[in-house]
Amino acid sequence: MSSKDRSDRQLDALLNEIDRSLADATDAEIAEDARLAGVDIETNARQLRQRFLDRARDFQKRKLAEARAAYAGELEKLQNRKFQIPASPAQQRALLQEAQRAMAVSAFRDFDSVPDSDLPGLIEELYALGLLPPLAEQE
Amino acid sequence: MADKASKKVPEDRAATAAEVEAAIFALSPADWYRLRNFAERRDMLLSEKLQGREVLGEAFERLLRGTRKWDRTKAGFMTFLYGAMRSIAYSWLKEKVAPTEAPLLASSLVIENEEGKFSDPVEDFSLPAVDAARLLVYRETLERIDALFADDEEIRMIIEGFRDGREPPAIRELWGFSQTKYNAIVTRMRRNMRKAGIVDPQGALRHVQ
């Protein structure tokens, strides 16, 4: 079947040309089109603009609410995280040495200079960064 | 599913929600009228409003969801919306194609017309096949257009050109119309079709809901 025999193609070509003429028409010509069609061009614009602005704002609100819920969830997860800290400073240093090996660039030459009181916090930070084996983590 | 248009646009060039909102504010009343007209013609041909869908709303939805992105460095907002509506209309039309129509050998579709010319199946496949009910809508719309312009010789000449599969420059050349004259005839056709409600078979010159 050639395009000469397909009414869909003939109509499509015709309507594409109407679309082109509408897109190329000046605003004054469009105003005349609307007047002839009995359409109040200002009311039409106001209604459509409001409809799509409402839709855009609803969408933004929904996205914001989703992001807030996701943030709250992450925060709760972080706050509820529990870590298993080895009992003695020697064991804690050994665990930190393990983390150091996992890091491509080591932040510390060794952990001897780190005060004992800072070791648990450092371990927690390394867990949070995912630099310690996940098995040691307890939810 | 994200469409191809969203994958092609890099994130840094895609319009943000705020830019989309600003672009909506910047559209003139004439722009809104253009969009409404464009959308109504597509919705009418696809009978989409019967299913509660319409191309302009869908274009905005996809833009907001990010499944279709507007590359503001490449095209204006109106150009983007026209392209999005065309693409959506095309994809909806494809949805309507019966699956049994697809697996045919192209060579089996070559037919000879009354002038002894063979059809080009590749060309014929560039638009999806449409079902009989839809073809009837198209045929009836063409008949209404023919009847509307029965007494307008110049418009009939242009319509004949399109029905013969000619492009606008070839139609102008065929009938010796200058660009200005041709544009004036198409404008007359556009306004009369609109006035006759041909783009909107529901009959009403209503606002898009």
Image (cartoon, rainbow, N blue to C red):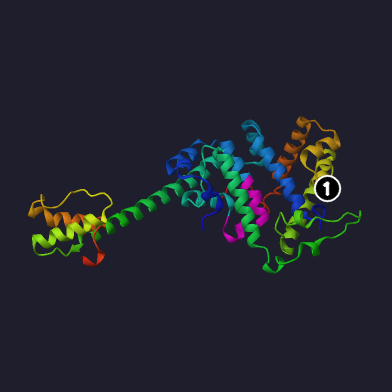
Task: Give yes or no for residue B48 being in the magenta stretch.
Answer: yes
Looking at the picture, how far across and down is residue A21, in whole percent?
Answer: 69, 38
Looking at the picture, how far across and down is residue B168, in whole percent?
Answer: 77, 39
Q: Is residue B163 above or below residue B93?
A: above
Residue pointed to by mark 1: B164
Categorize mark 1 by other alpha carbons within 10 Å: few (<14), some (14-19), many (20+): some
The count of marks equals: 1
What amino acid type is highlighted by mark number 1?
Answer: Asp
Q: Residue furthest bottom?
A: B100
Viewer-proximal residue, B144 or B3?
B3
Looking at the picture, how far across and down is residue B201, in whole percent?
Answer: 68, 54
Q: Main secondary structure of the magenta part?
A: helix
Task: Give yes or no for residue B7 being in the magenta stretch.
Answer: no
Circle 1 — which element? Answer: loop
Q: Say which chain tag 1 marks.
A: B
Looking at the picture, how far across and down is residue A105, in whole percent?
Answer: 26, 49
Start-end of magenta stretch: B38-53
Q: Is residue A91 above or below residue A25?
A: below
At horizontal 49% and vertical 46% (from top left) the residue drawn is: A52
At horizontal 76% and vertical 30% (from top left) the residue drawn is: B180
Viewer-proximal residue, A129 or A100?
A100
Viewer-proximal residue, B20 or B109?
B109
**Is A93 displayed left or right of B34 in the figure?**
left
User: Does residue A107 appear anywhere in the picture?
Assistant: yes
At horizontal 49% and vertical 40% (from top left) the residue drawn is: B24
